[in-house]
Each structure stands twice: as C-alpha cells, then as structure tokens.
Amino acid sequence: AATAILEPSADQDQKRRDLVELFRKYLRIRTTHPNPDYATAAAFLTAEARSVGLLTQTLEFVPGKPILLFTWPGADPLLPSILLNSHMDSVPVEEDKWIHPPLAAHLDPADGRIFARGAQDDKCLAIQYLEALRTLKADSTFTPLRSIHVTLVPDEEIGGRDGAAMFTASEVFRQLNVGFVLDEGQASPTGEFRVFYADRAPWRLIVKARGQPGHGARMYDNTAIENLMELVEAVTYYRNSQFDLVKAGLKAASEVISLNPVYFKAGTHSPTGFVMNMQPSEAEVGFDVRIPPTENPDIIRRRIQEEWATISMNLTFKLIELGPLTDHAGRPLMTATNESNPWWAVFKQAISDSGGKLAEPEILSSTTDARFMRQMGIPSLGFSPMANTPILLHEHNEFLQDAVFLKGIEVYRHVIRSLSTFMESSV
Ligand SMILES: CSCC[C@H](NC=O)C(=O)O
Ligand SMILES: [Zn+2]
Ligand SMILES: [Zn+2]
C-alpha cells in the first residue's frame, strides 16, 4: 500500500527529470553565433513538435536560415490566431571564462541550476511552449478555439533580417491572421514576472575623424584622435544626462536614450604592434544607440549632425537606423497594457490563474523580434517566465534553475489555454 501511494509522485519526479533532460539536450546544440547550427536545432525541434502532435512546416526565405512553424489548428479558423515566438540562435561565449562549459548544460546537483548559453535567452521558451502544448494535447476536455502557432526563428541576435523580418513581411505570415503574439522577455530577480510592451529601437553610430598626422613627439592641433576624443566627450555628456535620470529614479533605464561606446579604432599598426611615435591620420568610434518609442528620435539625429559629428571638426558619421520606429499606420511600436487591449486582460488573468504575479509592464532595454510583429500592428508582449532569477542574458555563467524552467511550462499551459479559447471575435 505504501508504494501505491508513493508511485504517482515517483512518476512525477521522473517526468520532471525527463523534461529537464530534454531542455539540456536542446541547450547542447551549438546555436551560438557566428555559425549557429540551425540544421540540428531544426531537426530536434521539429521532431519534438511532431511528437506533441503539431503540424510542422519549415520556411526558408534565405538558404540555411530555417523558420520553423508549428501549428495546432483551432476549432474556429476564422478567428485571429495566437503566435508564440522564440529564436534558436544565441550570442557567442568566452568559453574559458565560464565556471562550467557553456555548451555542456551542466546541472548543479545541489540547487538545480542549469548552466548554458541560451538557458535564459531564450532556448527555455521553445521547450516550455512545446511541453505546455503537450499537456494541453493530453487533456481530452480541451480544444483550442483559435489556432495556436509556435515559431522558431533564426538570427534574432544579429538583427532578424533573414529571420523574423522576412517572415512577418511574407504572405505565409499574413495568412496566419495572427491576433496576438508572445515573444521573449527577461528574467526577474523578484518573485514577480516581468512583461514588456515595447522594445527600444537599435541604432548604430559610427564616427570617423581625420586630422593632421605626424611625429609622436610633436604637438599638433586638430589631430584625428583629438577630434574624436572631443566627440566622445560630447556624447558622454549627453549619455550622463540620460543616465542621471535613471540614477535619480526618474526614469527606468529602458525609458531613456542610451549611446554607449562599443569600440575605438585608431593608431598605426606594424607587424609587432602599434607604432608608438606616430600620430595617425584617422580614428573611429562606434556607439550602440537605443531609442525608446516614447522619445523623439530627431533629438539624436539633430545632435549628431549639428553638434557632435560636425564637418568643422573633420568628423564624418554613419547612422544606421535598424528596424522600424512605427507600425504601418505610423503609430509608435507599443502594445497597450490597459482595457483598450482585450488580450492584456486575458494574459494577466492567466498568469494569476497559474499562481504567478506580474510586475508593472516595462519597455525592454534591448531589442527583440517582437518589433516586427508590432510593426504589422499586432499586439505583442515580451514575456519569459523566470521569477527569482538573476538577469544573465549575454553574460558569462548564464543559468536557469530547473524548478524555474518547469514552473514556466505550467505558466504557459494556463496562458495558452486562456488565449486560445478567448471568445471575443473583434480581435
Ligand atoms: C540590431 S537588433 C539586435 C538585437 C539584439 N537582441 C538581443 O540582444 C540586441 O542587440 O538587442
Ligand atoms: Zn533573446
Ligand atoms: Zn539575446
């Protein structure tokens, strides 16, 4: 009799271990840039989706860059569908700086932390979506009213041009008639889940200086390096004014414009290193620029042109504005998180049904593929169910705890169930 009572929980434990193993298997597929192994990831995920019972398709707008589209058709195919998106690629690693090899998916036996590149960003999502769908498939009382689509896309980490951008602009995407999207968010150090209603637009600013070259021992006016340093100082002044707003608690870091220097290129090279007694004729700096949808981007365009990178300083610049700032109707790329967006109430209620709590909706500091969905006018939220977890995306020793990963499946089970049975026909 004792074993009979113990059995269900032993089964549960085994099931949880199997799910964690599946997640680790996906983490071990090398999908890090610059050469993500999309073929292996696609084969693995497609096999999983088939085992769940989803329809599977592979779209390939650019050779070698598959977009996986998995579908559970809804009972009413005329209603707008829901889309759960996640990217397959990850950022690179500095292997020797990790406490465990970043592609081994080491599981800490004491506390269940799984160390791997992509553990938080965002390979957890693919498995959580699929496993949540598997539990819903197993529930004979459940049929989705709306079609449910899962997409696994390439190249998010390098801008999404050959991935989500092509996909959302395609006829296939239009046919899906997507009404609402969930995409990745970020971990939350507190017990509340974070949710994101917008991304910042990613720009790149490259400034090149030209000036008097010559002997390292002479003092010249207007050298390339001097002029570039003045530019960096002016940009830093503006950067600090924005950072001060954050430090004073007046704005969140994602609500200000950031301009962070990411490289300097200067000096004269010889095969043995820099030549120390020469002042170069050229120097260059690159900035990562992010613009929240609540700020006017002309502020920055004008400052660069009129104050920072001026001709009189012998500076030239290239401003690369990556991705859209507004949707096709000209509205800023923000998803409403109030009663004007009926999906919001359904999502929020589902989180609370799952026993979770949502923090105040935020703008995301970085940039995700959700911007392409918002550009199509589709309400899209960034959400990754990782509470009580340090924010480790793109860092060394990125990890996710097994219990947090497993809880996420539960959360999505509620969320997907609610969204896919949402009755309102106007959305
Ligand atoms: C140019 S879009 C780059 C997208 C990238 N996404 C995640 O980190 C980012 O830098 O935010
Ligand atoms: Zn990501
Ligand atoms: Zn990332």
Image (tube, grey):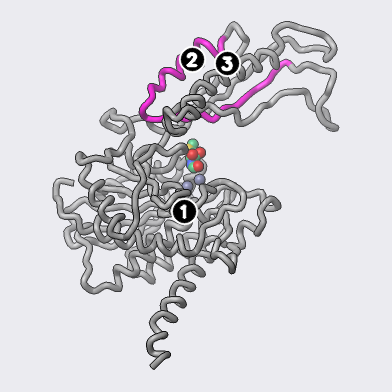
Which residue is the site of mark 2?
303
Residue stretch in magenta: 281-310
At a point 46% along the width and 58% down the height, the residue shown is 124
Note whether residue 153 is visible: no
Q: Is mark 1 within 8 Å of ligand 2?
A: no
Of 213 and 100, nearer the camera is 100
| Vertical position of residue 263 compared to residue 337: above or below | above
Report how far apart the C-alphas of labels 3 and 2 lie in the structure: 10 Å
Asked which secondary structure carries label 3, the reply is helix
Q: Which amino acid type is marked by label 3?
A: Ala
Select label 1 or label 2 by which is in front. Answer: 1
Q: How many marks?
A: 3
At a point 47% along the width and 45% down the height, the residue shown is 156
Name of the residue lying farthest toward the bottom: 1
Which residue is the site of mark 1?
388
Asked which secondary structure carries label 2, the reply is helix
Which residue is the site of mark 3?
234
Percent position (x, y) of residue 212? 73, 9
Select label 3 or label 1 by which is in front. Answer: 1
Classed neighbour count for the residue bearing mark 3: other residues with Cα under 10 Å, few (<14), some (14–19), many (≥20): some
At a point 34% along the width and 49% down the height, the residue shown is 358
Percent position (x, y) of residue 427? 18, 46
Percent position (x, y) of residue 206? 57, 24
Classed neighbour count for the residue bearing mark 2: other residues with Cα under 10 Å, few (<14), some (14–19), many (≥20): some
